[in-house]
Image (spheres, rainbow, N blue to C red):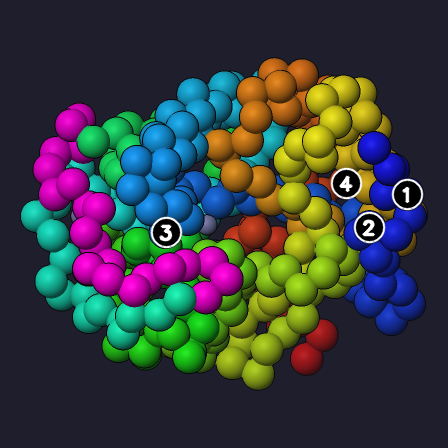
Amino acid sequence: MAYYGNFNPMVEKSGKNQHFIPEPYESVFLLSADFELAWAWRMLYKGEKGSVFMDQKATQARKNIPKILQLCERYSIPITWATVGHLFLEQCDGHDDIPRSDYYQNEYWSYDEGDWFDMDPRTNWKNALNWYAPDLIQQIRQSKVEHELGCHTFSHIDCREKYCPPETFRAELTASANAAREYQTEFRTFVHPAHTIGHLDILAEFGYSNFRSNYKNTLGFPKRCKNGLWELKNSYEIKNLNDRDPDFHIRRFIDIVKRSMKNRSVAVVWFHPSLESFIVDDVLPAFFQYLDNERDKIWICNHQQYIEWLNATEKDAI
Ligand SMILES: [Zn+2]
Ligand SMILES: [Zn+2]
């Protein structure tokens, strides 16, 4: 397996961007999870193959999440959980209030027949653990660590303007906000499914403060949009790089954090909770321990905590 060395992620020069890292830290480390169970994978394959794949992904995520939460507690690592809104529900009877997009096919979805919500089981969560997750959301909320619950749309749609009309996007945000209100949660962080960036003005209007983009892996700095939203550029995804050697992954992840300290930049790290067990069991503990040991040099916080600091700093500068 080729080692990515110093080329991935690319580093942005710190230069005049020094003010994005609070004193006395050398780096900011943000970790987020795209929490979706079966919702993300439903358009990937048709028929039986699709059902088996979705079930595997959702089952794996359900197995991993409690273990990840335990690790977060042991090493005090907060996560921003970018959550599909439907997972907050305890039950449902369909979603007629969300207008459907026209049929389309693209590199992520093949939505060419039926209804967007065809796979929604319309039942109680206990009967359909791949499509609802109030139990896991409670575990996240009850953790001693300051996790953040963010939004990943209500039903994992493509958010780009050419596929998603504004009324669909608004309805997805409204349904997500209503579902999260039951948990006294107001979303501030948004992650577009498959990084299909779109409708940023509507996000600002709904009170969001930041979103994560993924144009190329970057160790860089946040960028403020005209509408006030902050863009956080992805640095890397925690996943198996086809090399099951845990030490390889531990070395690589630690090396990237060291590079971000050297460059005085923000590390925006993300993962799918359905990742392979060996990453959770054999890679994350050592990686989290490294972060915990270095916390006097690295500010480890959730997205919204960092954005609040950014906004306060900017106000002071005016
Ligand atoms: Zn439903
Ligand atoms: Zn997703």
Residue type of the residue flagged with mark 3:
Met
Query: Secondary structure beneath disc 3?
Result: loop
| Magenta stretch, overall SS | loop
Which residue was labeled with disc 4? 298
Query: In the rendered structure, which disc, 4 or 3, sits on the residue that comes first in sequence?
Result: 3
Is any atom of residue 309 visible in this view? no
* Label at residue 8: 2
Give the CA separation, mark 4 to mark 1.
21 Å
* Label at residue 291: none
Residue type of the residue flagged with mark 4:
Ile
Query: In the rendered structure, which disc, 3 or 2, sits on the residue that comes first in sequence?
Result: 2
Query: In the rendered structure, which disc, 4 or 2, sits on the residue that comes first in sequence?
Result: 2
Image quadrant containing the N terminus: top right
Query: In the rendered structure, which disc, 4 or 1, sits on the residue that comes first in sequence?
Result: 1
Residue type of the residue flagged with mark 2:
Asn
Give the CA separation, mark 3 to mark 2.
30 Å
At x 65% / y 37%, what residue is drawn?
238
